[in-house]
Amino acid sequence: MKKIFGGDNLQNFIKKLTVLCTSLCLIIFSVIYVGEKNIPDKITVIEDEEFNISNDLGVNLYSIGDNGQLDTVMKTSSYPQKTKIKLLNIIPVKETVIYNAKRQYVIPGGELFGIKLYTDGVIIVDFEEIETENGTTCPAKISNLKTGDIVKSINGVSVTSSSHFSKLLQESKGEKLQLSILRKDKTIDVEFQTVLEKDSNKYRAGLWVRDSTAGLGTVTFYNKNNNTFAGLGHPIYDIDTNEIMPMKSGVMADVTLSGLNKSSFGKVGELCGTLTGDKSGILCLNDVTGIYGYSNTNKTTEIPVAVKTEVKEGKANIICTVTKAEPQIYEVEIVKIYSNATSVNKDMIIKVTDEELLEKTGGIIQGMSGSPIIQNGMLVGAVTHVFVNNPKQGYAIFAERMIETSNKQPKASTEQFNSAS
């Protein structure tokens, strides 16, 4: 009788079993890796709606729970709840947290608006050498000041503007000063002393500062719950330091659009316009998720805001203003979704597919940041960045992030609302 597991047969069986086990392990680890990357750390479930892991995340192999509950988190579940997502209900893939929330509704924007932002203190943007009777020096460098530092006060006196900062330095007449500096969210005290410039006979600090900025952006939505608006989808940075500008106050201004420069490979275009003297709102927050403020609008039609699990790859639309006419709707495609993006402004990659918009702008241009993205009748996000070497594509932020920030702002007071109207 022939031995089934003898000699070469046993070796072949072991080899095949090894290959099978290795392949199975690779498949399991691959699925776990993909699940870890693609399953959100936080899942929002809309109140009175069921959430189905298979349908809503497209991961048919996954099931939920430790007690045999498969696929569906029922609307009667208690929230928030930590949930283990498993492969075949056996192998743990990821632990996520499921929250319950009411459906949010907003009025979509698309209008171009002007931004006048005034900083809280002054930002150090550059240094210079000062020629004195004793040679060349830079007091700012001697005191170890850095670009991006924000000077909040001098000898306890709050700095209100660049001119006020210069006035306080001149009045010091070279005496030692105590500067309160905000650096990377940490407040530090710096001892500082100006020097007398040889030619001008004025006391100089050897640094350049900025106290304001201006620009253009697009309104993403109006939130009637607290009369706020949201725009840009990303913060306003200082052009020299690339740091988020600390906002003390700001104005939403009307814009006169004069034209545009088209985007092309390696060159980002821009909308060209001037800020009028008319104010249409006030700013209250410069945040990583965008710029926020209070404003009134004559528009009344609201649409639902999608949570991130409702956003799908495929066709969508954006609303933006690239001519002197009213905001127009253009076709785009959501080509990639990052459920756990490390940057809050880069949750999606979108591609402009509308031939009319491509003819006008060449793709995404500066000033279009904040343009609302609509899919299946819901606000799903806002345009944030353009790819320099492929201006037809760019990044977008989830609308869910922006509405969360908007809802945290206090409801506009009568004075604020009247000031913004």
Image (cartoon, rainbow, N blue to C red):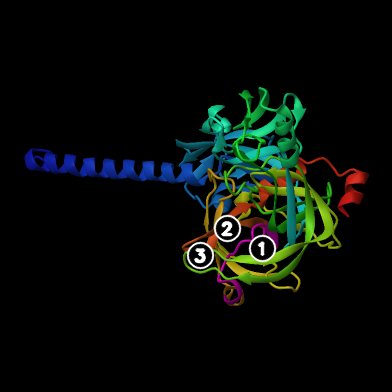
Instruction: Please tell me in which quadrant of the rendered image residue 166 appears.
Output: top right
Q: Is residue 351 above or below residue 54?
A: below
- Residue 23 image offset from top left, x and y in percent: 29, 45
Q: Can residue 317 be seen in this view?
A: no
Q: Distance between the residues labelled 1 and 2?
A: 10 Å
- Closer to us: mark 2 or mark 3? 3
> Is residue 375 in the magenta section?
yes
**Residue behind mark 2:** 312
Q: What residue type is labelled 3?
A: Lys
User: Which residue is identified by label 1?
Assistant: 376
Q: Which of 286 and 68 is in front in this view?
A: 286
Residue designated by label 3: 267
Calculate the distance from the C-alpha at mark 3 to the C-alpha at mark 1.
33 Å
- Gap between marks 2 and 3 measured at Cα: 30 Å
Residue contact between numbered discs 1 and 2, judged by CB atoms under 8 Å: yes
What's the residue type where badge 1 is placed? Answer: Asn
Earlier-in-chain disc, 3 versus 1: 3
Mark 3 Cα shell of 10 Å, populated few (<14), some (14-19), many (≥20): some
Residue 5: x and y, percent?
13, 39
Q: Is mark 2 on a helix, strand or loop?
A: loop
On the question of residue 133 being in view, the answer is yes
Q: What residue type is labelled 2?
A: Lys
- Which region of the structure is painted magenta? 359-379
Point out the tag, 2 or 3, that comes first from the N-terminus. Answer: 3
Q: In screen coordinates, is 298 left or right of 399?
A: right
Q: Would you say residue 29 sits in the magenta stretch?
A: no
First of labels 1, 2 by sequence position: 2
- Please give the name of the residue rendered at 70% of the width and 41% of the height, measured from the top-left corner: 100
* Residue 248 pos. (x, y %): 75, 40
* Residue located at (47% from left, 64% from top): 266
Instruction: Give me the residue at 8% from left, 42% from top.
Output: 8
